[in-house]
Image (tube, rainbow, N blue to C red):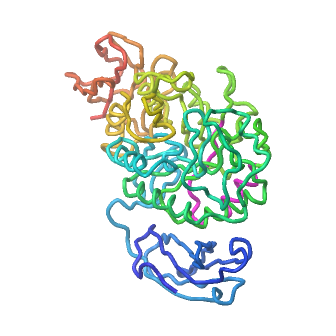
Amino acid sequence: MEIVSQNVERWNRVEISLNGPQVGNPFLEVSLEADFTFKQREISVRGFYDGNGVYKIRFMPDEPGQWSFMTRSNQGELDNLKGNFTCVEASGTNHGPVRVSNETHFAFEDGKPFYPFGTTSYVWNHQSEELQKETILTLNESPFNKIRMCVFPKYYEYNTAEPALYPFVGEQKKLYSGTFDFTDWMVKESGFDFERFNPQFFQKLEQQIDILQKLGIEVDLILFHPYDHWGFASMGKENDLRYLKYIIARLGSFRNIWWSMANEYDLMDLAQQKKKDAWDELIQCVVDEDSYQHPISIHNWHNPPVHAVNNSHWYDHTKENISHVSIQHDNLFFVPKWHETYKKPILIDECRYEGNINNGWGNMNGKKMVQQFWEGVCRGAYVTHGETYLNENNIVWWSHGGKLIGESPERIRFLRKLIEEGGPKRLSPLGAESSHWEVAAGISDDSYVLIYFGDSQPIFKVFEFLPERAEFQGDLIDTWNMTITPLEKAVTNQTVIELPGQPYMALRLIRK
């Protein structure tokens, strides 16, 4: 028995490595679990086969002190093994996993606020080693602290190359011309053995997630998606559940993990891959297997009409197992209504992408992307970035990673700095001041107000919602040119505030 470290930081991983049988199919025939005990608490986790006769158990302790463990297995050499380790206090940037906070916001487990400023790069992890390194360098210099990415490879426009590694043993049976065809999603016969995982694939994924953790990036890991010509989207319930148990055993102890059950889950029904009524059981499996209760949600394809708040195409995010609302929608006016309906954090995980491709969802300009971020913040939600600019090599950030070339990331960095500096900001809309044309948000003690005018261009403004007899220091913010200019006079209710008559301006009011 080997324990990686006798002293493990709170919210870091303990890894127990054991030697066991290699005959038959260890993924099916060998069961392995461990019970971890701290004082009167006991937490059970599932172990997994890592290939070459090696079995592993991983655990994330959440309290400092002396922990002990004991294994359970149907194999004698893996059963009833005991050990202990010491958990010490977290240090540096280790704040624990992210949790829902104040109903519609997020915080790390130690209480430090977390404001998601995310990006999308679905299968950067399936690209060449050179491109992966370039992506990591870009992320390290970017403003983003969260990324949406897939476990499975992706077959879609601009992304038809085969990956170097597959999650299961086997090979792709059909030869493809490299052109995109939706009919390929309806796989009739797969060349992969869904009862045998490829440990090398998952080892690589773990390395990538660990690198992102060191960069301070949360990983919103997409467990299923429809863009498939290998059969991974249509493995059947038994194989789906086995896959979920295996990946959670491997990754549940990574503190920067979020679970996204699927990207555009309702499209999988149309592609005859997975019925919509299958998701409750799959989500329940994740909740049951994940001893650490990481954030979990599911992302839609179809949107209701612009005048509607919801419809039957959306998964019911009011369900207890869903921690936050992850949606595709480009009209943020509805965010307050979604908060009222779901009483959970709202993440606009796809609001179109900054880029220049043929598809309407991928040719938004940089100004509109920045506007979406500001509107999201001022409506009490969080928006996710994506970039779809074409280049001569067809390396598109939204799918492959590489370099960011758009205008929005630096402006998003500017906004993130504004929100993160100072005390916690649990912003929520301020009633009638949140409209189609301008949005205002504040915190519950009336000490901080943020107003965004979007593409409107007033030359003055009078606010009537500020507390009586309260004075505020005001700052005029140019959200595009990234400047902050203090107002000369204090702001009170009914104060006439002169404005430059330019779009993309904002006001910040801090109570004196």
Is 509 positioned to the left or the right of 11 in the image?
Answer: left
Residue 277 percent across, percent down from the top left: 80, 45
Corner quadrant of residue 144? top left
Regarding residue 318, the answer to whether it shows in the image is no
Q: Nearer the viewer, residue 332 or 229?
A: 229
Residue 250 percent across, percent down from the top left: 57, 66
Is residue 364 in the magenta section? Answer: no
Segment tinted magenta in the rendering: 279-300
* Residue at the farthest left position: 488
Q: Quadrant of the C terminus?
A: top left
Q: Nearer the viewer, residue 91 or 155?
A: 155
Is residue 288 in the magenta section? Answer: yes
Is 401 positioned to the left or the right of 498 in the image?
Answer: right
Regarding residue 206, the answer to whether it shows in the image is yes
Say if 205 sits above or below 233 in the image: below
Q: Nearer the viewer, residue 454 or 277?
A: 277
Is 329 positioned to the left or the right of 379 in the image?
Answer: right
Residue 13 percent across, percent down from the top left: 47, 70
Residue 254 percent across, percent down from the top left: 50, 62
Query: Which residue is found at the position 41% from the left and 79% from the top?
Result: 5
Say if 298 sits above or below 192 in the image: above
Query: Which residue is found at the position 46% from the left and 32% from the top?
Result: 387
Is 13 positioned to the left or the right of 221 in the image?
Answer: left
Say if 23 sits above or below 177 in the image: below
